[in-house]
Amino acid sequence: MVTSKHSETINKPEYFTDVFDNVNVPGFFDRWGPENVVQVYDPQLGFQGVLVIDNTALGPGKGGIRISSTVTPLEIFHLARTMTWKCALADIPFGGAKSGIRVDPFKVDKNKIMCAFARLIAQYVPEKYIAAPDMNCGENEISAFVTEIGDLNGATGKPAKLGGIPHELGTTGFGVGVALETSLGLIGKHIGLPEDLSQVRVTIQGFGNVGLGIAKFLANKGAKIVAINDFWGCVYDKNGIDISEAEKHSYATNEKLSIKNYKNAQEIPRDDIFKVDCDVFIPCACGNVITKENESIFKAKLIVEGANNPVTLDAEQALYNRGVIVIPDFLANAGGVIGSYAEYKNMSVEEAFYLIESKIKENTKIVLEEHISSGLIPRNIAMKIAEKRVLSAMNARTREDLSKGEKKMTNTVDAGLCINCIHKNTCTFLKMEYKVFCEEYECYTIT
């Protein structure tokens, strides 16, 4: 593992915390990664940043740039790991990565910040990291990023004028819709829900890129969207919200523009969306919003993760125990990264949406058919598929390195211990400068 840090010995602004300085980077490491953790600081513009390249066995690390005043290296690591599984499950030649900039996005010139961040991580782009939009980062910021890097392949989600397929077209939300529609067709009757989208009641948490995208998808399918919220508030209408009117309040950057100001529905407290009586709940905001402490208040029978990591693992188990199914993020919201791959391969917008639909429909079918036959939690089934693909690629890369002689063999040990290997003292392994490969059991790790 390589850990890099670029910083200045300078007095930092008071609002900077020590979350970057005190982070236990080695504590992130396991058999899958991360390969690189890069921390940066710009003393003139006053921001901290982090890039986590988790695993590149399948291809360059792919993941968005998150801009937030609360972003931490641990959060970015978890998101990078999710991207590793997301790309593997989607069966596209990208690895997992993520980056974050710790600054208040509403109080800075984001394009200027983005250019500075691009300069600080340029050595990794695009060979090991390909950026994309994320929270508070859209096509304009991505345009600034690739312009500064000097390589259009340095990011996807670029404006159309730069040959991109902007995430603002709703690729992620469209994929969430495909996952939901496919799920209802496969397991709706098993969990007491209609198989037809036009007969379900849906609530959407978050009304930005993903929330608006899924709202449009559902409206076109005739679904009844009974509640929507954003950072400032929530609106509820048991008869359904008119998305063509509500869209005016999407992407709100202040309370005046918020969905709470939508006039044709009842305003309720923001977090009361968790209590709304509905069939399907779609979290499209941030992580860890459904926890063991609040899962019992949810009335939905199906949760489709539009955001990354919105349901904690213990909450998901509790939900499953009472018959609520969660369609995991790295399956449901892969539309964005599949669209990114289409852009990377110079496909058209139409080809991108076709690819998103076909891949997410097929993967949802594989996971849920196994769920029906085995009774396993869908996340565990999807994880098994993704892990198998990544491990196969890691072993193939190691064998290729060996055959090319790129890693000098230093010794051979019999009856040794392969780090993270469940077979412990029963295998023979080859120890090289940086890698340990358990040949007999095809285990792989980095030491």
Image (cartoon, rainbow, N blue to C red):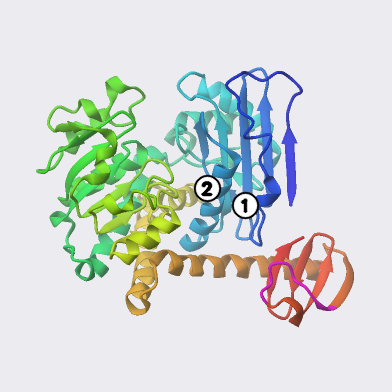
Q: Which residues are magenta?
A: 414-422
Q: Quarter holding the C terminus?
A: bottom right
Observer-nearest residue: 91 or 43?
A: 43
Residue underneath mark 1: 54
In percent of width and height, residue 311 lies at: 40, 52
Q: Marks 1 and 2: CB-CB under 8 Å?
A: no
Residue in view at x 49 percent, y 51 percent:
341
Residue underneath mark 2: 79
What amino acid type should be assigned to the residue bearing mark 1?
Asp
Earlier residue among tags 1 and 2: 1
Can residue 420 be found in the magenta stretch?
A: yes
**Residue 252, relative to residue 298: is it above or below?**
above
In percent of width and height, residue 302 lies at: 27, 58
What amino acid type should be assigned to the residue bearing mark 2?
Leu
In percent of width and height, residue 200 lies at: 16, 55
Residue 330 visible somewhere in the drawing: no
Residue in view at x 14 percent, y 27 percent:
263
Q: Quadrant of residue 358?
A: bottom left
Q: Label the magenta part by its dominant secondary structure.
A: loop
Q: Residue furthest right?
A: 410
The answer to whether 240 appears left or right of 380 in the picture is left
The answer to whether 436 appears left or right of 65 in the picture is right
| Crowd band around label 2 with a 10 angstrom C-alpha radius: few (<14), some (14–19), many (20+) | many
Residue 239 visible somewhere in the drawing: yes
